[in-house]
Amino acid sequence: MAAIPQDKDYFEAILSQPEDLQLNAKSRFSLKITYGMPTNIDPETSLPETITLLQNYPNPFNPATQINYALPEAAEVTLNVYNLMGQRVATLVSQQQSAGNYSVTFNAEHLASGVYQYRLSAGGKVLTQKMTLVK
């Protein structure tokens, strides 16, 4: 295999005209360089459009699970877990939060197996999901 020249002009020539670069028929991979494409995402367009409370993962779980939610704007947020009798068994979040996507870990090792509900209150909306703890 021939060594690739380390000459700066050689690389500038290849990068200025990538269509002139010919690949060997035995090549398994190729690299396409595209100029003028953005390399980052505009933070304003990546914000959620609505308040969202996703299903926990994994579900059923033992002993911990992830709860994800999204806020389109800053709000006072509470995220509580309730048993089926309506008793609050955990408060996961109780604070002002800015717009964005959030993930909270709920560790239920001290709770009995069963079905629980988690409730997100933010921006005047209340969203609820069910989750199952299996020990």
Image (spheres, rainbow, N blue to C red):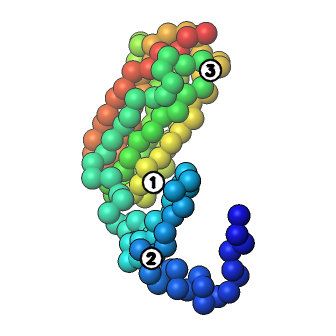
Query: Mark 3 to mark 1: distance in Å?
Result: 28 Å
Look at mark 1 in the image and give the residue it sits on: 96
Nearer to me, 3 or 108: 3
**Rendered location of residue 98, percent (x, y):** 43, 58
Look at mark 2 in the image and give the residue it sits on: 20
Q: Please, is residue 89 above or below residue 113 in the view?
A: below
| Closer mark to the observer between disc 2 and disc 3 | 2
Q: Please, is residue 102 above or below residue 134 in the view?
A: below
- Of the residues under marks 2 and 1, which one precedes in the sequence? 2
Look at mark 3 in the image and give the residue it sits on: 63
Q: Residue at x 44, y 20 (%)?
A: 131
**Rendered location of residue 16, percent (x, y):** 47, 84
Q: Which mark is residue 125?
A: none
Tell me where residue 86 sits by quadrant.
Answer: top left
Nearer to me, 82 or 135: 135
| The N terminus: image quadrant | bottom right
Query: Mark 2 to mark 3: distance in Å?
Result: 57 Å
Query: Could you say whether the residue bearing mark 2 is in a helix, strand or loop?
Result: helix
- Drawn side of residue 15 relative to residue 43, left or right: right
Query: Mark 2 to mark 1: distance in Å?
Result: 56 Å
